[in-house]
Image (cartoon, rainbow, N blue to C red):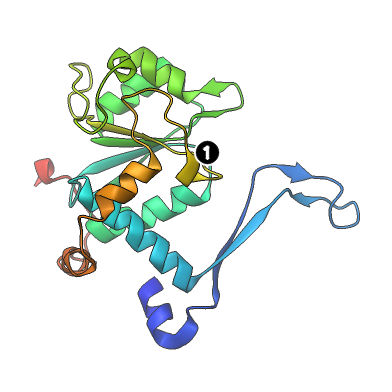
Amino acid sequence: EVDRHVLGGRGNHPAFVFEGDRWDPSKNDGRGGPVFEIEIDYRRLLVETVLRAEVLSGLGLGKGDRIGIWSTNNIEWLLLQMATARIGALLVNINPAYRARELAYALQRSKVQCLFTIPAFRSSDYVAMLVELLPELHTADAAAGLHNADFPQLRRIVVFDPVDPAHTRRPYPGFLTWPELLAAGKTVSAEALQEITASLDRDRCARPDTAA
């Protein structure tokens, strides 16, 4: 659908407007409004989505794989959802209110192979809870992948700053960051990604390969 708008000459038309979850009561003559809002047109949406699809493919993820996101609403959430659709992967949404025990249950049941997360939100320190569940994040080589008996499918955890992913700080050696993902994406050509997307059956929902 996004491609159709861009190819049809409507690339500069707004695709969506994202409003942050912080509210400024002084805006709009006292009626209030979001602290910030970002408008993205179809052309930028296509570019950003394809970039993330290349990143996921460069990490070895593809059709039927499960990619988790543990985060509040933000632009990256939407872009990741669209990117997983381009490679036939399943996006697993994990409740941002979960604590460590609930997170462990969700990860084990969903069998996600890669998890995207923000560092923290309000009183929830997502990084600390992940380190509690996977102590090897303290010392693991993020590029080599994780190996944990309690979460055997989970190989990578990506932390991103929802406001500025490119400048996300690595909390511990075992976490991947956005610049590293960009490097992984460079190993996948636009032609290769197009072939992956074209091979998918748009009339069928993505399913894990293990369920086939």
Q: State the image coordinates of residue 133 (x, y, percent, origin top left).
A: 34, 15
Q: Quadrant of residue 54?
A: bottom left
- Residue 29: percent from left, percent from top: 91, 56
Judging depth in this view, the residue of 119 and 73 nearest the camera is 119
Amino acid of disc 1: Thr
Residue 130: x and y in percent read: 38, 21
Residue in the image at 21% along x and 69% along y: 194
Q: Count the marks: how many?
A: 1
Q: Left of 10 or right of it: where is 139?
A: left
The residue at the point 27 percent across, 53 percent down is 185
Question: In the picture shown, does residue 7 fall above or below 196?
Answer: below
Decide: is 104 above or below 49. above
Q: Quadrant of the N terminus?
A: bottom left
- The answer to which quarter of the image holds residue 129 is top left
Q: Residues within 10 Å of mark 1 (few under 14, many from 20)?
A: some
User: Could you tell me if residue 48 is visible in this image?
Assistant: yes
Image height check: is 50 above or below 69?
A: below
Q: Which sits in the foreground, 185 or 44?
A: 185
Q: Can residue 89 be seen at all in this image of the molecule?
A: no
Image point (47%, 72%), residue name: 42
Which residue is depicted at the point 20% across and 44% down?
A: 65
Task: State the image coordinates of residue 34 (x, y, percent, origin top left).
Answer: 72, 50
- Say which element carries label 1: loop
* Residue labelled with disc 1: 72
